[in-house]
Image: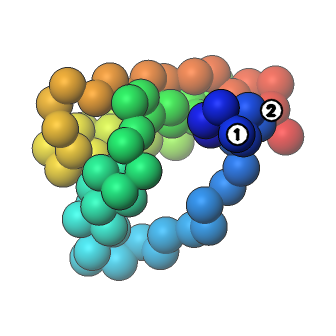
Amino acid sequence: MDAQHPIPLPLGYVTNTPDLYPNLASLVMEKSVSTIIVGYPERNKAMTTQIDKFIINLGYSVDSSIPIIRVDEHFSS
């Protein structure tokens, strides 16, 4: 999202391979991402455990100055 594109659009997808975190880190750098938002299903404890691990690993892969924010996705589709 920027001044020319005020509505965020998807960039595509990444696959869950051994290169997942390096690929995400490259994308974050390439697009000058300032904040990472992760959907967090607070009512699904089985998923939150997996997502917490994902966030920790992502945090190790990107610049530590980039905040990773959890957003409750309970009411999303």
Q: Nearer the viewer, residue 59 or 43?
A: 59
At horizontal 42% and vertical 50% (from top left) the residue drawn is 31
- Mark 1 Cα within 10 Å, few/some/many (few <14, many 20+)? few
Quarter residue 55 falls in = top left
Q: Nearer the viewer, residue 6 or 72?
A: 6
At horizontal 23% and vertical 65% (from top left) the residue drawn is 22
Q: Can residue 21 be seen?
A: yes
Q: Is residue 73 left or right of residue 71?
A: right
The label number, if any, that marks residue 4 in the structure image: 1
Reading the image, the residue beneath label 2 is 76
In the rendered image, the vertical position of residue 10 relative to residue 12, given as above or below = above
The reply to whether the C-beta atoms of the residues labelled 1 and 2 are less than 8 Å apart is no
In the rendered image, the vertical position of residue 29 relative to residue 6, given as above or below = below
Q: Position of residue 66 (x, y in %)?
A: 28, 29
Helix, strand or loop under label 1: loop
In whole angstroms, how far apart are the C-alphas of marks 1 and 2? 27 Å
Q: Nearer the viewer, residue 59 or 11?
A: 11
The label number, if any, that marks residue 43 in the structure image: none
Q: Look at discs 1 and 2 and give the one toward the viewer.
A: 1
In the rendered image, the vertical position of residue 19 relative to residue 41, given as above or below = below
**Which amino acid lies under the numbered mark 1 shown in the image of this protein?**
Gln
At horizontal 60% and vertical 61% (from top left) the residue drawn is 11
Q: If the image is split into quadrants, where does the C terminus sit?
A: top right
